[in-house]
Image (tube, rainbow, N blue to C red):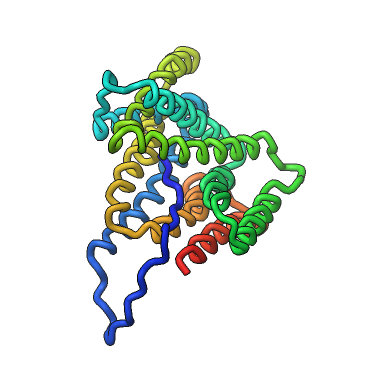
Amino acid sequence: MHAASARPAAPARRTPPAPTAPKPDGTRLTGVVTMVGSGLSNQTGAAIGSLAFPVLGPVGVVAVRQYVAAVVLLAVGRPRLRTFTWAQWWPVVLLALVFGTMNLSLYTAIDRIGLGLAVTLEFLGPLSIALAASRRRVDACCAVIAAAGVVTLMRPRPSADFLGMGLGLLAAGCWASYILLNRTVGRRIPEAAGSAAAAGLSALLFLPVGVAVAVRHPPTPTAVGCAVAAGVLSSAVPCLADLFTLRRVPAPAFGLFMSVNPVLAGLVGWIVLGQSLDWTEWTGIGAVVAANVLGILAARS
């Protein structure tokens, strides 16, 4: 699961500087540590899941990830499905479809263009949502910086995989839709029940897909273990960590940390999968990250 970078509705209050250096706030420090663990868990899970691609393919890995996400969210949200009205059901159904499409397009993109580039392109989804809601000049500058980063990443070259890049952009569009639908679901269904219902429905839709993959490509214990690890590390851990973090860390700080996920993805892809990036690709990733950081900092001023 993903969480989009958030912006405060009003500038944060400024407190006068203390005469001496304040002691670190234990609660906030715990939240920061949790954010670091969540980001690393998410990207490491995706990297481990990609190790099962030769056996299960991206489709099989995503199917297992959907099952794990459903088990965790249903246990947390405990939705009372019989009480849902049609006005509550239709956004849940759309959210389930978007959730599955987002993960499938992302993992297929990872298979084709690598973890760092795929996650960076996907990150354009929440960034677009944040920039589209504002008319400030600084946000226009952020959009230009992000666009320059995308052009750098998608520049024509002999080794360019435009299908993989297109899938990364599809994942971005799905993530943007996921954010908007989650807001709708959250307004109509209390707490995490709506998201849990969507995760369960998405897993149900992937059930025949998982059976078909298992019949055509008999899974090995190692491949299944990698796929389950991807579900736990990329769905269960980030979901629970975000619930914990958002209660302890201000929204701007949470958004700033989310901005570095493309960098974490590039580092994890390099360390775990040996997917090295050249300086132009790191420049493109840096431009996308900088655009989001600049937008959040400007919103706080």
| Closest to the observer, 72 or 157 | 72
Q: Position of residue 89 (x, y in %)?
A: 38, 23
Image vertical order of residue 288 relative to residue 22, above or below:
above
Question: Is residue 220 in view from this perspective?
Answer: no
**Residue for point 25% across, 35% down:** 76
- Which residue lies most toward the bottom here? 19
| Callout count | 0
**Residue for point 38% across, 19% down:** 204
Q: Position of residue 300 (x, y in %)?
A: 45, 66
Question: Which image quadrant for residue 288?
Answer: bottom right
Q: Position of residue 126 (x, y in %)?
A: 51, 47
Q: Is residue 111 left or right of residue 195?
A: right
**Residue for point 35% across, 44% down:** 238
Q: Is residue 161 left or right of residue 15?
A: right
**Residue for point 56% across, 55% down:** 134
Image vertical order of residue 300 relative to residue 49, above or below:
below
Q: Position of residue 8 (x, y in %)?
A: 42, 58
Image vertical order of residue 109 relative to residue 29, above or below:
above
Locate the N terminus and report the quarter of the image it occupies. top left
Image vertical order of residue 76 relative to residue 20, above or below:
above
Q: Is residue 148 left or right of residue 207?
A: right
Question: Is residue 196 in view from this perspective?
Answer: yes
| Closest to the observer, 26 or 177 | 177
